[in-house]
Amino acid sequence: MRKIRMKKLAAITGILLMFCAVAAFGQVRIGIDGAVEWDKMEINAVVSLDLASAGLKLPSGRTQGEAIMTSEYLRLIRPGLFNIQVDSSSTIKDLVLREEWSLQEVESLALQATTVPAAHSQDLRLLSSSYTLGIDGISAAFIRHSRPTQLQRTLSPVAAPSYTGIIILAAESLPVHGRNVAALPLPCLFPKVWDNDMNLIFEKNMLNPGTNAMVRYFHVRDIFSGGPSGLSPEIAAVVGSHPLRIVAQGVFGIFPTDPIISREDALLIISNDENRRLFNEGRVVIILNESVLKEPLE
């Protein structure tokens, strides 16, 4: 019984200390700046502390300043992670609110970030630390199936060459299926691909386990680079030297994240065993408008 009481006392003491720390830092000016960079598959953030507001001076206050930034990092990065679009209908915050994901899982992802040692500004007013979090690691946390779902075969296959990857061009405003509007397609962790008969062609459960990223996003300029294929080295690393290039016909979703391709292009993929495997291996690139590939952290 005494042990239980001691545990309760320790827990209460911990909570009180946490509130005291929050109160102590209430006047401290600390913030975060950065962006979700879909073309780099990274979240890059800088946490900055105004030393004077914390009553600190360099060099003696450096260690304490770093400790404050470390303690506040999770609180500051959490809204940015919550806003990440998982698919056409849900953000990470939506999944947490629906209890499909926990806050602890979100914070565990945040702690995977790599950090750069803190540095002070030229005027010695600010102390800043940089964090980089891979979007691949976030995607991997959502892929929990042990076997990929197989893409349905067609009863009317067409003759199709074997490709090394798939590029979907969706950098312009496209008609939104079911609505009388057009919109720029947006990035998300798990976009679906549909044909214009609204048959589902690609979704995340088709990925082989261990394949972290379902698709990669790039700028238009990356498909007009030098070299025989015209592709940037970064795209070529995903789709190889002989990809199938597809122009999206439309976009679908509550948030317009899911490209719609023609039935003819879909048949080139699903009529060939090797082409179907490109989906399993995540050898898919979507070209988006540059304006949507970088989202500021909020």
Image (spheres, rainbow, N blue to C red):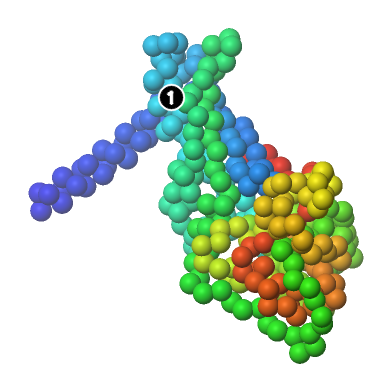
Residue in front for this viewpoint, 28 or 296: 296
Dot 1 corresponds to which residue? 66
Figure quadrant of the C terminus: top right
Query: Furthest-bottom residue in view?
Result: 155
Left or right, residue 215 beside residue 9 = right
Percent across and percent down for residue 230 are 82, 49
Residue 295, located in which quarter of the rendered image?
A: top right
Q: In terms of depth relative to the viewer, which is nearer, 229 or 197?
A: 229
- Residue 10 lies left or right of residue 140; in this view the side is left
Judged left or right of residue 284, residue 245 is right
* Residue 195 showing in the rendered view: no
Horizontal side, residue 80 vs residue 1: left or right = right
Q: Is residue 179 above or below residue 11?
A: below
Q: In which quarter of the image is residue 221?
A: top right
Secondary structure under tag 1 reads: helix
**Residue type highlighted by circle 1:** Glu
Question: Where does residue 21 sit, x and y in percent of width and height?
Answer: 38, 30
Q: Residue at x 85, y 76 (%)?
A: 264
Place of residue 182 in the rendered image (x, y in percent of width and height, measured from the top left): 88, 59
- Against 27, residue 296 (above or below) is below
**Taking 238 as reference, is 65 above or below it?**
above
Mark 1: few, some, or many residues within 10 Å (few <14, many ≥20)? Answer: some
* Foreground of the two, 249 or 11: 249
Residue drawn 75% across and 57% down? 241
